[in-house]
Image: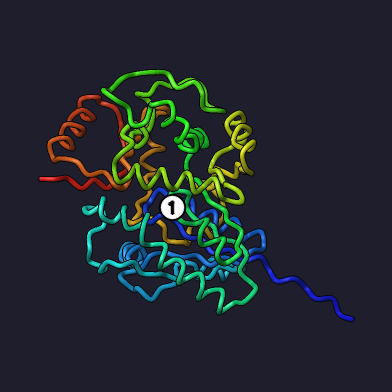
Amino acid sequence: MSEIKPSKLHAIMISLPYQGHINPFVNLALKIASKGFTITFVHLEFIHLRLSKAHHNNHTDVDLFSEARKSGLDIRYTTIGDDFPLEFDRDLNFPEYWNYLFHKFSVRVDEFVAKTIQSHPGSVHFLVTDTVYAWPAKIADKYKLVNAVFWTEPAFIFALAYHWDVIREKGHSPLKDNMEVEIDYVPGVESISTKDLMSYITDGESIVAEGLFAAFMDAKKADFILLNTVQELEPNTVSALNKYQPNYAIGPVNFFKNPTANTVSKSFWPESDCADWLCSKPARSVLYVSFGSLVQTSKQIIEEIAYGLLLSEVNFYVGCSIKHRR
C-alpha cells in the first residue's frame, strides 16, 4: 500500500497595516515559507494600492510575491477590504481607524478565514497575526487553527504590556498626577521608572490604550508567541515569559538575508539607496533620526527639529513620513 504523504503546513498571515509591522511580517513569511510552509499572506486593499503606487507604477494587478514563488517559495498573496473607501485617509483619521481595527475588522478576517478554509478544506493549520490585534484567539478557536501571534518589537516592551493588568492593579496605569515611581515587579524586566513606560500604558484610558490592553490580554490565549528579538540579548525576559506560555525569540527577522526579500514591495514610499552616501562619512559620524510612519505634528515642531539638526553640525539621515497639522 502506498504511503500517504501529509499535506504541507499552511499559515494565514495578517499584519497590522503600518510600516513597522509590515516589514517584519513580510520577512517572517519568507522565512517560514523557506522552511517548507505554505503561506497565504494578506494585505488590506489600501495597503496594496499604496505599495503598487510606490513601486509598480500604479499597476494594482501586480502580485507582490510573484518573484518569491519563482524562487520556489509557496506564498499565496491576496487582499481583503475594510469598511472604508480607498481614498479615506486612515492616517489623518487615526483614532477612528484604530478603533475600527480593534472592534470591527475581525468580521472581515473571519469571513476571509472561512472562505480560505472552504477553498482548501483540511489544509489550513495556523493563523499568524499581529499581537496588536484583540481578536485572533476568537477566530483561531472558531476554526480550530493554531493561534500564533507575532510581536514585532523587543521582548522587553512586550513583557511590560503583557503585565499591563498587574500594572493597573498596582495603580500605575493610568498614571495619576504625573507621579514618578519605580516599577520593579514585572517578571523579566529590571526596575523601570513610570516616566520611561510606553505612553499608552501611562495614559491608560485613550482609544489606543483601550484597544492595546484588550490585545495584550488576548495574546495570553495564544498557543505561542513569536518575538522579534534575540535570545542572547534578552534571556531573562524571554525566560520569564515562557513561564506563562511558549515564547520563541526568532529575530531579528527585519534583517532576514535572502535575495527574494529584496523583490517584495514593503515600503510605502519609493526607496532610495543611501549606502554610498553613508559609506562616504567617517565611522560613527551619522545620526539616524526615525519618527516612524504615523507621526502627526505641527509645522513649527518639524521646523524646530530641522533647525536643531542643522545646529548640531552632524551628518544625519531622517527616516519618516511626517504629516503636519496647520
Is residue 253 placed above or below 126 in the rendered structure?
above
Badge 1 is on which residue? 133
Given the image, on which type of amino acid does mark 1 rest?
Tyr
Residue with the most extreme right position? 1
Above or below for 133 versus 287: below
Instruction: Say whether residue 291 is left or right of residue 237.
Output: left
Up the image or down, 259 lies above or below 190; here it is below
Percent of width and height locating residue 220: 54, 45
The quarter of the rendered structure image containing the C terminus is top left
At horizontal 32% and vertical 62% (from top left) the residue drawn is: 54
The quadrant in which residue 180 appears is top left
> Are there few (<14), some (14-19), or many (20+) residues within 10 Å of tag 1?
many
Q: Residue at x 54, y 47 (%)?
A: 253
Q: Nearer the viewer, residue 131 or 30?
A: 131
Q: Nearer the viewer, residue 165 or 195?
A: 165
Which image quarter holds the N terminus?
bottom right
Residue 148 placement (x, y as % from top left): 57, 53
Residue at 37% from the left image edge and 27% from the top image edge: 285
Place of residue 289 in the rendered image (x, y in percent of width and height, measured from the top left): 32, 35
Identify the element where label 1 is drawn: loop
| Extreme-front residue of the structure | 169
Above-or-below relation of 81 to 268: below
Q: What residue lies at 38% left-to-right and 36% top-to-bottom? A: 280
Residue 178 in picture, x, y percent from top left = 28, 23
For this view, does 177 lie left or right of residue 34? left
Q: Who is closer to the viewer here, 186 or 125?
A: 186
In this rendering, position of residue 110 left or right of residue 202: right
